[in-house]
Image: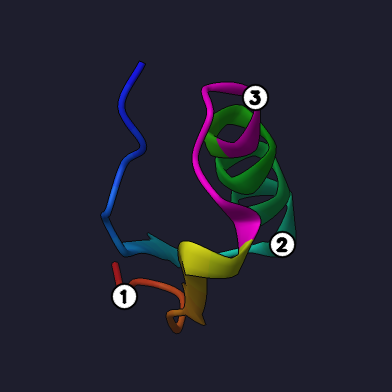
Amino acid sequence: MTKRKVDVTILCEDLQQQVFARYFLIKRGFDAKKIRLLSLPDGQR
């Protein structure tokens, strides 16, 4: 299988979403060093 040469940026509002998305991507074969996490402020209603 070929290696993925992709950088991934995860945009999430809370830590739980970040942990889940990062865990899922790592389990799917993405390199943990290529995953970037960005916290966004909560949305307004």
Residue 28: horizontal and vertical position, in percent? Answer: 52, 22
The amino acid marked with disc number 1 is Gln
Is 11 a magenta residue? Answer: no
The amino acid marked with disc number 2 is Leu
Q: Nearer the viewer, residue 28 or 22?
A: 28
Which image quarter: residue 44? bottom left
Determine the residue positioned at 49% across, 63% down: 35
Q: Earlier in the sequence, mark 3 or mark 1?
A: 3
The kind of secondary structure element at disc 3 is: helix
Find out whether the residues at labels 2 and 1 contact each other: C-beta distance under 8 Å. Answer: no
Q: Nearer the viewer, mark 3 or mark 1?
A: 3
Q: Is residue 13 left or right of residue 24?
A: left
As measured in the structure, the alpha-carbon distance from the residue carrying label 2 to the one carrying label 3 is: 18 Å
Around disc 3, counting alpha carbons within 10 Å, would you say few (fewer than 14), some (14 to 19), or many (20 or more)?
few
Point out the image quarter for the C terminus: bottom left
Which image quarter: residue 33? bottom right
Residue with the mark numbered 2: 15
Point out the image quarter for the N terminus: top left
Residue 34: horizontal and vertical position, in percent? Answer: 47, 65
Around disc 1, counting alpha carbons within 10 Å, would you say few (fewer than 14), some (14 to 19), or many (20 or more)?
few
The residue stretch that appears in magenta: 26-32
Residue 27, numbered label: 3
As measured in the structure, the alpha-carbon distance from the residue carrying label 2 to the one carrying label 1 is: 18 Å
Q: Nearer the viewer, mark 2 or mark 1?
A: 2
The kind of secondary structure element at disc 2 is: helix
The amino acid marked with disc number 3 is Lys
Q: Earlier in the sequence, mark 2 or mark 3?
A: 2
Find out whether the residues at labels 3 and 1 contact each other: C-beta distance under 8 Å. Answer: no
Find out whether the residues at labels 2 and 3 contact each other: C-beta distance under 8 Å. Answer: no
Residue with the mark numbered 1: 44
